[in-house]
Image (spheres, rainbow, N blue to C red):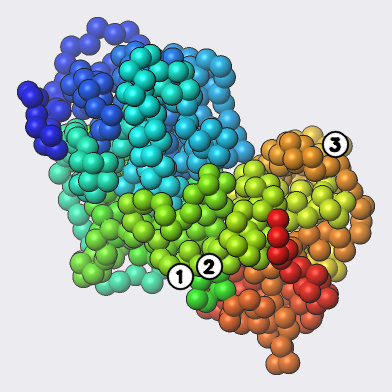
Amino acid sequence: MNTPRKKAKIHLVEESSSGNHKGVNPLQKQREQLPIARGKDALVREIRDNDVIILLGETGSGKTTQVPQYILESGMAGSGMIAVTQPRRVAATSLAARVAAEQNVSVGSLVGYSVRFDEACSADTRIKYVSDGMLVRELLSDPLLSRYSVIVVDEAHERTLRTDFLIANLKTIQAKRNTSNDIKGKRPAPELNPLKIVIMSATLDAEKFSRFYNNARVLYVKGRQHPVQTFHTAASQTDYVDAALRTFFQIHTDKPPGDVLIFLPGQEDIESLDKSIKMYARRLPEERMSVLVCLMYAALPPTQQARIFSPTPPGTRKCILATNIAETSITIPGIKYVIDTGKCKEKRYLSKDTGGGFDTLLTRDITKSSAMQRAGRAGREGPGFCFRLYTEDAFSSMAASAEPEIRRCSLTQSLLQLKCLGQDLEAVDFMDRPDVEAIYSALKTLWLLGALDNAKSLTVLGRQMASFPVEPYLARIILASGEHGCASEVIDIVSLISSSSKLFVDISEQRDAISDARRKFRHPSGDHMTMLNALRSYQNVAAAESKIGRKEWCRQHFINERTFVEALKIRDQLRLTCGRLGVDWRSTRADNEEPVLRCFVAGLVQQSAFLQPDGSYKQIIGQSVVKIHPGSTLCEKKVPAIIYDELVYTTQIYARGVSSVPKSFFTAATPPSGS
Ligand code: CDP
Ligand code: MG
């Protein structure tokens, strides 16, 4: 630890040994036992002495929960706040809860969080766990992020588009804030307090971050990693959910106690495996350990998150079904067995196929780096086992690590945000540069939406669009509703679309029953108005029925109640933004779908298709032939033109969330040429 040279990698701590702990609070004792605790003083000194620190450390060593507390306790943040960014909102909320508990305060006081559509902060908040997207949003109103004296960019290895956006902008913000203080040579004005940046990552690829920040110091926390015995399947598996089910029960019947963590690509697979495990667990002989299944995915309500971290009851084996969120951002104690399906969902922009404008989630093979992180989760507290549901050859042919999002996702929203900051995408100093084609496509989308004029300059409409916490195309739909006097209906529908889970449950085997159950909501124009009808009915039921009655009503109609609950929260936020922009969110054209659909056409210009003579639908912008999804109310219908919320790729390209609109609406929807 002595006088380390610039750029040298320093080992802050060696393998931690258990010490004597006098603390009475069990959480304090746990804090002191974390691998990072022994390097606390050195770490604080390094952060104090350097403007930028890159901190690497194995998952579970205590980076995310401890570093912000160390900074706070050292007093170096002064009167400013400490922001800790997370790529995932669930991670931000659950970490804030943990750190608040460690500080013995309630969430929203000293320790808070801010994620899209949800915030728990107050004037007392000093440590704020924030989704990377929310901090980008804060930049728009406070371009120097002057409320913060330290910004911790966590999970930087994930290289999300928004994290990369922040990393690029923080470099220039720091140059402005820290140099102008030097020039003044006196106490800085409060809005120009110097900024410290800590970049944290769970993988060892630190050079790139260090180089980007002018060879910033790299610190290394050694974690506790016990050996993990890894097994591969002899043959490749076609049904990974079924393979995971069988592997789980093999472990459960043959292996000693220890919790199991199963990695699956997404919520649907998690929910289906949850059902099967519970069904088979009920048939186990009485004398067997019982099984407690817990779920962890992005849309999981906060009330259910706590179960994952609570100690496993005696005589029970906990089985956690998680997405790649449990790879590095959340460490779950007690795991001895990992089952890795080898799959994840990845956001990807399919410009050539779709005509551009938006991302799709695709299930794909994970990378070697993910596979190793997943295996590592089994060895946190003792020797563990990892069962890979793929062959050793499949592992060998995996890509080393994922491509940064900036190279594979839609840049539309980021481009709009940069325009609001007076920057051009082409000119920003990013760690990895985006593709020229992707930039072009984002420019085109924003022009089609009327956010940019012919000279690529931001329009008044574009600036208004950026104020909404939703994708630009959805913001465009809301803004159109101001002109058409139907904001009330449009905001309701946009809120339902923006919710993290789908409103209508779609089970392919039960489509006839589902269609019958929902007949009374069905609107001839298609899914958008049908969703609105469902929401209206639900609100009537909610006013008259008990909680159980509401639940039963949702079950009977194959509806996710969670979507309604979330949508109503989102609606409040969207109304608030409308209020700020002078858009009357109360305006309504009761039961007239025409103006509502006109608004959707304004935003879904790139998500629209015309009927062809052969009965197929071809995109208006873009080359793909799309089919209406079998779960849609318009399935099998032949109408002259459709608009849709998204495309899903299975054996074919399906449009989901579909409405029928007159062809004539499209000529009226050409973009304005000026501001
Ligand atoms: O960021 P890093 O992966 O280095 O570790 P961390 O997230 O700070 O977690 C440190 C420890 O806190 C781990 O052992 C977690 O199991 C524990 N933790 C917990 O018990 N409950 C939470 N909600 C969050 C963390
Ligand atoms: Mg962490």
In the foreground, 567 or 478: 478
Residue sitting at x 88%, y 51%: 485
User: Is ligand 2 less than 8 Å from the beta carbon at label 1?
Assistant: no
- Which element type, helix, strand or loop, lies under badge 3? helix
Q: Three-letter amino acid code at disc 3?
A: Ala
Upstream in sequence: badge 1 or badge 3 = 1
Query: Which residue type does callout 1 highlight?
Result: Glu
Q: Which image quarter: residue 580? A: top right
Residue 543 is labelled as 3
**What is the residue that sits farthest to the bottom in this orientation?**
614
Q: Could you say whether the residue bearing mark 1 is in a helix, strand or loop?
A: helix
The residue shown at (41%, 42%) is 169
Question: Badge 3, how many Cα within 10 Å: few under 14, some, many 20+?
Answer: few
Q: Label 1 belongs to which residue?
A: 437
Taking depth in this image into account, of 277 and 162 the one nearest to the observer is 162
Which residue is drawn at the image coordinates 92% and 52% (left, top)? 590
Mark pair 1, 3: CA separation:
51 Å
The residue identified by callout 2 is 441
Residue 373, can we see it? yes
Q: In this view, does 408 lie to the left or right of 647?
A: left
Q: Distance between the residues labelled 1 and 2?
A: 6 Å
Q: Is residue 293 above or below residue 402?
A: above
Q: Position of residue 413 (x, y in %)?
A: 55, 53
Q: Do the CB atoms of the residues marked 1 and 2 lie less than 8 Å apart? A: yes
**Percent position of residue 599, x then y:** 78, 59
**Residue 559 visible somewhere in the drawing:** no
How far apart in space, not on screen, are marks 2 and 3 (Cα)? 46 Å
Mark found first going from the N terminus, 2 or 3: 2
